């Protein structure tokens, strides 16, 4: 049985850009096939950044992406997924 594709919005707050940015970008590159759009806004004064992602993938693929991002120190992730 094939899992149904879903649309999701994922918000990523990177609280420590210097130490986390490379890991975040590596994970995003690994999941590039499900990323429809990406907007990143740096906040240089606070050494932070915010990334908004539009995703089209199965719940397993979305969970893999958000789980890996959320496991990075200094990164917070929230998502909203269609039913």
Image: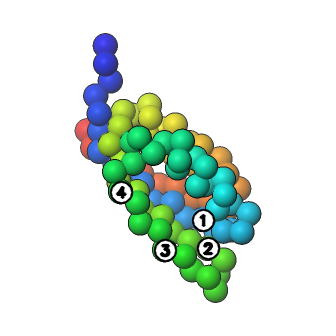
Q: Is residue 80 visible?
A: no
Looking at the image, is mark 4 or mark 1 nearer the viewer? Answer: 4
Q: What residue sits 58% from the left and 55% below the top? A: 25
Looking at the image, is mark 3 or mark 2 nearer the viewer? Answer: 3
How far apart are the two marked residues, 3 and 1, measured between alpha carbons?
A: 10 Å
Instruction: Give how far across and how far down residue 53 sits, in percent.
Output: 40, 57
Snapshot quadrant of residue 67:
top right
Looking at the image, is mark 3 or mark 1 nearer the viewer? Answer: 3
Q: Which mark is residue 41?
A: 3
67 left or right of 3 in image: right
Q: Which mark is residue 37?
A: 4
Residues at circles 2 and 1 in contact by the CB criterion of under 8 Å: yes
Marked residue nearer the N-terminal end (3 or 2): 3
Marked residue nearer the N-terminal end (3 or 1): 1
Residues at circles 3 and 2 in contact by the CB criterion of under 8 Å: no
Snapshot quadrant of residue 62:
top left
Determine the secondary structure under disc 3.
strand
Residue underneath mark 1: 14
Residue underneath mark 2: 48
Marked residue nearer the N-terminal end (2 or 1): 1
Marked residue nearer the N-terminal end (4 or 1): 1
Label 2 crowd bin: few (<14), some (14–19), many (20+), radius 10 Å: some
Instruction: Give how far across and how far down residue 17 sits, in percent.
Output: 66, 68
16 versus 83 height, above or below: below
Q: Is residue 45 visible?
A: yes
Q: Could you say which is closer to the camera, residue 7 or residue 82?
A: 7
Q: Residue furthest left?
A: 83
38 versus 66 height, above or below: below
Q: Which mark is residue 54?
A: none
């Amino acid at each position: 049985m094939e899992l149904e594709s879903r649309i999701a919005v994922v918000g990523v707050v990177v609280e420590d850009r210097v130490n986390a940015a490379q890991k975040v970008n590596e994970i995003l590159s690994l999941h590039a096939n499900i990323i429809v759009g990406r907007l990143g806004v740096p906040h240089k004064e606070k050494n932070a950044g915010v990334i908004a992602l539009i995703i089209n993938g199965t719940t397993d693929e979305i969970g893999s992406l958000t789980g890996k991002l959320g496991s990075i120190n200094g990164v917070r992730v929230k998502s909203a997924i269609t039913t």
